[in-house]
Structure formats: C-alpha cells, structure tokens
Amino acid sequence: MEGPGRERKPSTGTRDIDRLLAVHFAERTQSTPSAAQRQVKIVCGADQRQVRKGLRHVAKSLAMRSGLFCKKAQMVRVPQHLLKERSEDVRARINALSEIPEEWISHATHWQDLNRQHLGNVAGKPAPTPNEEYLLYQTLVGAWPLELSGPAERDTFVKRVQEYMVKAIREAKVNSSWLDPDAKYEEAVEQFVARICDENTGMNFLADFCPFHTKISRAGPINSLSQTLLRLTAPGVPDTYQGTELWDFSLVDPDNRRPVAYALPDRLLQDLKAEWRSNQGRSRLLHQLLENMNDGRIKLFLTWRALTCRRDHPGLFTTGDYTPIAASGTRRDNVFAFLRTHANQNALIVVPRLTLKQNEAGWRDTQLALPAGMRSWTNVLTDQRVTANGQLSNLLADFPVAFLLSDAT
C-alpha cells in the first residue's frame, strides 16, 4: 500500500510526484526550494521529454502484447491492488495532479498552514504527521463527492476518510499498526479529519480546497473515460471491476466492500438502450450524457457501446493487429491513438490525455496521421457516418473519446 513510511521502488509518473512532494511537504523551508520541489519538473507530467517517452512506452507495450498470442489473452485492467486502495475514478482525479505539480504543492502547503491549529499532539509528535497529512489531502482531492446534499452525507464521507486514514497509518507501521494499534494517535488523526472537513472549523481550508477540487474534478471524468475505452479496446481481455460501471469514488475496505448496487446500473442501462433505439433519441441522449456527466451514465454508455462492438466483431479485438497512430501539432502530447485491424475491418481509438492542459487550450492544429484509404468511418458512440481527416477538433467534437469503425478500401 502507498501508506506513509513504506519504502517504494523508484518509478515514473504520479508515484514519483507523490514521493517528491511528500518529502518537500515534510521538510519545506520558506527561504529556498527543497530538492524535492526542484525535481518535480523532471517527472512525468511536468517534463515534456518524459511525457513523450511515456507515450512511446505504452505504444511499445501494446504492440508487444498484440504480437504474442499468449499476451493477447492477458487481462487488461487497472491493477487490482490499486483498486483496493482507491477506485479507478479516484485515481483518475489524482493522476491529473501530475500535470500541475507546482500548483498542487502550493495548495497543499497552504492547507498545511491553514490546518496547523487542528493538529493533535500525541507523545510530543503531531497527529497526523506531515507525510500522513499530505496523503490525506491527496485522498480528499480524489474522493471528495461531486455533490454533498446535507450534513448526513458529509458525515458519512468524513467517516469513510477516517477509516481510510486509520488503515493507511496502521499499514505504514510508523505511528500505529495492526498488531499494536495506538488508539490515542488514531483518534487524534480522526479528529483532525473531522475538523478540517467541518464547514465551521474548516471554513478557511474548504474555501481554498473546493475551487481547486472543482478544477481537478473536471479532468477526472475525461481521464476515466479515456482509460475505460483503452481497457475495452487494447490488445487483451478487458476486465471491469464490478461497481465501476458508473462513477465510483471508493477508498479502501471496508469502503470498497460495500454491496454492489446492481439494480441502479441495470435500470440505467435499460433506459440507455431504449433511448438509443428510438428514432430521435440518439442525439438527445448524447446531449444529456454530456450535460449531466456527474450522474455517471456517460461511463456506463461508453462501456456498453464498446463491449457491444467487441461482441459484434470478435476477431478485431481478440486477434486483430495493433498499430499506433502518430499525432502532430500543438497538442500532440495530449492524445493517444491506435488502430486495431483484422481482415478488412479497422477500428480507430482516440483518447485525450493530460486533460487539464488540453481543456484549457483546445485541439488547435493537432491531427492524426491516418493511413491512406481510411476516410469513411462509423462512429460507434454516435452511430453517425463520418469522414475522418485526422483533425482532433473533428474526431472529438461530439464525445470526449472516439471509437470509429471502417472498412479498408
């Protein structure tokens, strides 16, 4: 688990930023930048060389998987141990922090100052410690509900976060543990969580946290839709964690051990299918999904349409070839695209990445280098015939991600 105090092997991406910023968070000074802060620009999300290296690494990995029969049968999923810590939608938000490391650390250290008055003191040490406090802020960014309708929902959320923090602290084995729990320390951390999330005692913190969370939560759904489509169309066998067909902001057990609400997604899916089959319903349905992204139906819709296409074209996605598609233009680092090809059938998959920056700038002159002879497509997500010229502004005009089918000519 990524709890405070545990050793972790060097890696790239969001985990590097977690590690570096946590060090800076614990040891920051007012006079000079910490070594961790100076290194922030080097890791993925801040250094464009690393951004492009990441794209090449993913493309190479998928090509290798496509070329080996044994690899084609492997599961494609978000790693299960990560899902047990934080759901895929929580991590989709947290991943957006890697795009704005300096802004993130500025907010996190400001929150540390605002909430210093709420720290406990157990045997001469703060509760939580700076490293644990950093973990808490990261978790709040990832799991804070899209809407809190009243005190009861806020209390429920606070209880979930308290349970998450106690488990993280015990598994870190620094200030408490499963075999030798420190009840006083854990209680002090729980009180800290309650105070900073309270509308009265945490007023100053929430006044800064909520606008920042709103910014991150706009990127989270796009990140989630991108990874959902990749999981369902990349070489391999897709695995969908039950209960994540809609937005799911679960944390660790017992939070993620709650019964799966099968009835709700089943009812919503039947409604989506009925609307899709109606004569005038498709354009209206797409408009509703985009206008009401918070209800999660757009993720359920994407999952349904992609799995339906896999069922109708099994060879394309089980034994089909994988070909990466290069992008050019101003926002070339903000898109990932590839073709799946089998016999005379082709599928084009296009997903945005680093969506905070892309949302602010738009696609501008960015385009894909599509193979010659592939211009007439059917959009699986809109059921419209389209002529794809490679312009991202056209491919992603009607939906956050693109899934097109074409017959080679």
Image (cartoon, rainbow, N blue to C red):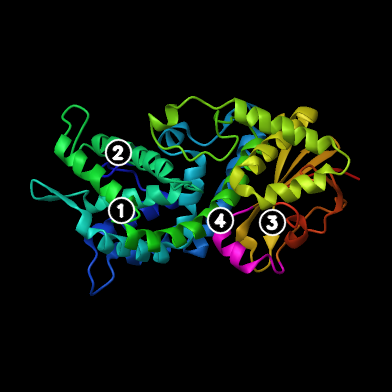
Q: Earlier in the sequence, mark 2 or mark 1?
A: 2
Determine the secondary structure under disc 3: loop
Most extreme residue toward the right, as rendered? 409
Segment tinted magenta in the rendering: 352-365
Disc 1 marks a residue whose amino acid type is Ile
Q: Is residue 356 magenta?
A: yes
- Count of numbered badges drawn on the protein: 4
- Mark seen at residue 196: 1
- Mark seen at residue 218: 4
Q: Earlier in the sequence, mark 4 or mark 1?
A: 1
Disc 2 marks a residue whose amino acid type is Ala
Which residue matches tag 3?
A: 326
As measured in the structure, the alpha-carbon distance from the residue carrying label 2 to the one carrying label 1 is: 19 Å
Q: Nearer the viewer, residue 293 or 171?
A: 293
Q: Nearer the viewer, residue 11 or 103?
A: 103
The quadrant in which residue 219 appears is bottom right
The quadrant in which residue 397 appears is bottom right
Q: Please identify the quadrant where the N terminus is shown.
A: top left
Q: Earlier in the sequence, mark 4 or mark 3?
A: 4
As measured in the structure, the alpha-carbon distance from the residue carrying label 1 to the one carrying label 3 is: 46 Å
